[in-house]
Amino acid sequence: MNTALLLLPDFALILLGAGIRRWMHLGDHFWNGVEKLVYFILFPALLINAIVKTRLDLAAALPLLATAFAAMAGGMLLGLVPRLFTRLPALTYASMFQCAYRFNSYIALAVAGMLFGAPGIATMGLIVGAAVPFANLVSVWMLARHGEVGLWREVARNPLIWGTATGFILNLAGFVPPAPLQAFLGRLADASIALGLITVGAALRLDGAAGVKVFAGWLVAVKLLVLPLIAIGVASLFSLSGLNFQIVVLFAALPTASSAYILAMRMGGDGRSVAWLISATTLGSMLTLPGWAAWLSR
């Protein structure tokens, strides 16, 4: 129970973001600016700061990543099942399909940091850095016949990938940041969690799932309940334990990424249904993530 309570401040920040968006009327331009600041500056600084300071266990990296990718693949396969029984428009289905396996990086790093400190952020950062290109590739492939997007350009300039890669290169090179640089990165890292979670809350939308409720409910259950079970099974096969086991299960239990909405809208998809799914998985994870965290700490 104590482990579950540790996540309460993170979810309180998400609800605060929703309240600020509702009652302060700051406008889309403000929130777009804050999200860009977090995405391109603060979160990369968080990743670099955590990875540089953490002793890495590269021998466990491949089983860790294989487990994370297996959980995502499970989400993709389960996301295909409703296609056999529903007659959703192809573009609506392709838009919602990505919600079965994409993950919210802001919540991922916040939860890892709250529960496990810098080693948790470094381990989660490794998974996020490797999984972001994979998730983007599959999502765009599903939507490819209905729109166009500069996929490789987006992957190449993704700041989470670059932040992870920079941190690992500096770590392996034995680089120790001087005290002023450590303090600078630390300040940015501290700001990233709070602002990142507030922007997640500001993006919550609970309208737009009319006509797709069965499919939407299936995807919520897959994302929050089934994928962590897949991760537990695969991690056990690879004999993962300790921090790596805990982080990969929490990764599998994350709510859907806010960027799924952006991609759906950019490619002419069903943004309203995707926004509902993002919100539903985020709010649902306020119950399921503490539950998984408590189970992992038993």
Image (tube, rainbow, N blue to C red):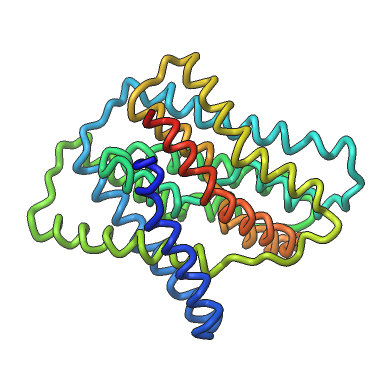
Q: Residue at x 18, y 62 (%)?
A: 184
Residue 262 or residue 81, whichever sits in front: 81
Q: Is residue 24 above or below residue 78?
A: below
Q: Is residue 7 visible?
A: yes
Residue 79 spot, x, y in % from top left? 73, 38
Q: Give the residue drawn at x 72%, y 60%.
A: 267
The image quadrant where one finds the N terminus is top left
Q: Position of residue 216 (x, y in %)?
A: 75, 49
> Foreground: 261 or 213?
213
Front in this rendered view, residue 80 or 280: 280
Query: Is 140 on the left-hand or right-hand side of 294?
Result: right
* Residue at the extreme left: 179
Residue 248, image x, y percentages:
45, 32
Which residue is depicted at the point 53% across and 55% down?
A: 154
Give left or right: position of 198 versus 261: left
Quadrant of the image for the C terminus?
A: top left
The quarter holding residue 245 reads: top left
Q: Work out whether residue 26 can be spotted.
A: no
Determine the residue located farthest toward the front in the rendered image.
1
Count of numbered labels shown in the rendering: 0
The image quadrant that residue 196 belongs to is: bottom left
Judged left or right of residue 68, residue 182 is: left
Q: Identify the residue at image location x=46%, y=54%.
A: 158
Q: Is residue 18 above or below residue 138?
A: below
Q: Position of residue 35 (x, y in %)?
A: 46, 68
Decide: is 199 above or below 133: below
